[in-house]
């Protein structure tokens, strides 16, 4: 039975896993979901870059349950290029889970995650490797500009990073996506994190170690379309906040406390007023207002708690993070001069 099918508690120890590791110097992990049109363009550009990098490489494509021609395109690449590995997940699990699979399967001393749509230019890999050789465990690539993305997406992304950093106790670098390099010990650390709610940007920051940030300009997608509609982005943001912060729970109790305090003061005011001046039957709108406000606040607080309880429920099932349909490993090669 492969490692990925075992429940977390039964997974082999880290030492056992690292004996599989470091069969090559660099692993490039590429999550793929319905990208038949871009895979060949991406690979052509990637091998040009890798040809100039010393050492032995492998490129692991994680097919996240594609339903277009991507599996065939990947198989063609794999057959003609020994450094290409292909893993297919049993269905579409989402990018976060595909990246988790890639990190567990990678055998390199350094591992780079890169999108297949060429928004993250492979040409930056040599400078990432240089930063790693200079001692960095994590090389974060920060987007200084984002071509081909709507104002709404840019603005929401901007605020997302600011808000999550306010709420989370771990500093999550702003405007850094999943395009990053990890040293072997950083990858081993990530592979030890057992949670199935995988907000990877948070986990990448959580592991710590020496992190270096390089700037780049994010290009537009060369072909195909983004797999992140706004609803999915919203759920992703919710995932981020709930897995890295309990502040919303605290806010719910503060709001509850404040409204209870307000209601108490209001009751006092009424008592005094009625005592001295009497009260005719007025105040129906006030009553409705207060009932609606308090009802709304209570539902909101229950909703926030529900978000966390739901996640505890999902975690408590201890399901595997992903399931592999197959994994065809690479024969790591050195396309370039040693
Ligand atoms: N992706 C994936 N699984 C998914 C959605 C996306 O593996 O469920 C991959 C996709 O093929 C691409 C990367 O994740 O390589 C980034 O996706 P996309 O370009 O759609 O996101 P965006 O750049 O618009 O944020
Ligand atoms: Mg993209």
Image (cartoon, rainbow, N blue to C red):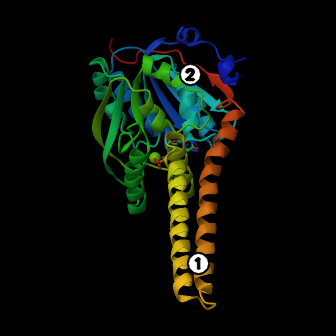
Establish if 205 lies above or below 176: above
Residue that protrudes farthest toward the front in the picture = 276
Q: Residue at x 63, y 13 (%)?
A: 12
Establish if 35 lies above or below 110: below
Q: Position of residue 224 (x, y in %)?
A: 51, 50
Q: Earlier in the sequence, mark 2 or mark 1?
A: 2
Establish if 209 lies above or below 38: above
Camera-nearest label, 2 or 1: 1
* Residue labelled with disc 1: 289
Determine crowd level at label 2: few under 14, some 14-19, many 20+ residues with C-alpha closer than 10 A.
Answer: many
Q: Secondary structure at mark 2?
A: helix
Establish if 336 lies above or below 97: above
Q: Taking the image as drawn, is residue 328 in sight?
A: yes
Out of 89 and 190, give the one closest to the viewer. Answer: 190
* Residue labelled with disc 2: 105
Q: Position of residue 240 (x, y in %)?
A: 51, 44
Out of 19 and 126, give the one closest to the viewer. Answer: 19
Q: Residue at x 49, y 40 (%)?
A: 244
Q: Position of residue 139 (x, y in %)?
A: 34, 29
Query: What is the quadrant of residue 16 in the picture?
Result: top right
Q: Is residue 77 left or right of residue 298?
A: left
């Amino acid at each position: 039975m492969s490692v990925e099918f075992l429940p977390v508690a039964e997974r082999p120890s880290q030492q056992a896993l690292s004996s599989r590791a470091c069969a090559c110097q660099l692993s490039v992990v590429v999550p793929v979901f319905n990208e038949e049109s871009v895979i060949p363009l991406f690979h052509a550009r990637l091998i040009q870059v890798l040809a100039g990098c010393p050492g032995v490489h492998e490129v692991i494509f994680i097919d996240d349950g594609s339903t277009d021609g991507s599996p065939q395109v990947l198989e063609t690449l794999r057959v003609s290029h020994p450094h290409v590995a292909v893993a297919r997940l049993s269905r579409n699990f989402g990018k976060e889970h595909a990246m988790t699979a890639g990190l567990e399967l990678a055998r390199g001393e350094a591992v780079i995650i890169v999108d297949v749509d060429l928004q993250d230019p492979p040409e930056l890999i040599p400078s990432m490797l240089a930063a790693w050789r200079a001692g960095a465990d994590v090389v974060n690539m920060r987007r200084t500009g984002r071509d081909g993305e709507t104002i709404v997406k840019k603005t929401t992304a901007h605020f997302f990073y600011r808000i999550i950093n306010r709420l989370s106790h771990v500093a999550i670098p702003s405007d850094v996506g999943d395009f990053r390099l990890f040293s072997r010990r950083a990858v081993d650390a990530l592979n030890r994190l057992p949670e199935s709610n995988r907000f990877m940007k948070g986990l990448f920051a959580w592991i710590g170690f020496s992190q270096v940030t390089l700037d780049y300009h994010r290009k537009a997608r060369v072909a195909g379309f983004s797999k992140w509609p706004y609803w999915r982005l919203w759920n992703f943001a919710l995932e981020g906040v709930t897995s890295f912060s309990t502040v919303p729970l605290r806010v719910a109790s503060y709001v509850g406390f404040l409204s209870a305090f307000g209601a108490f003061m209001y009751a006092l005011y009424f008592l005094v007023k009625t005592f001295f001046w009497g009260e005719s039957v007025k105040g129906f709108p006030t009553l409705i207002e207060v009932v609606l406000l308090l009802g709304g606040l209570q539902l909101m607080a229950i909703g926030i708690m529900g978000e966390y309880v739901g996640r505890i429920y999902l975690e408590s099932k201890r399901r595997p993070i992903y399931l592999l349909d197959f994994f065809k490993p690479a024969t790591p090669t050195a396309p370039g001069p040693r």
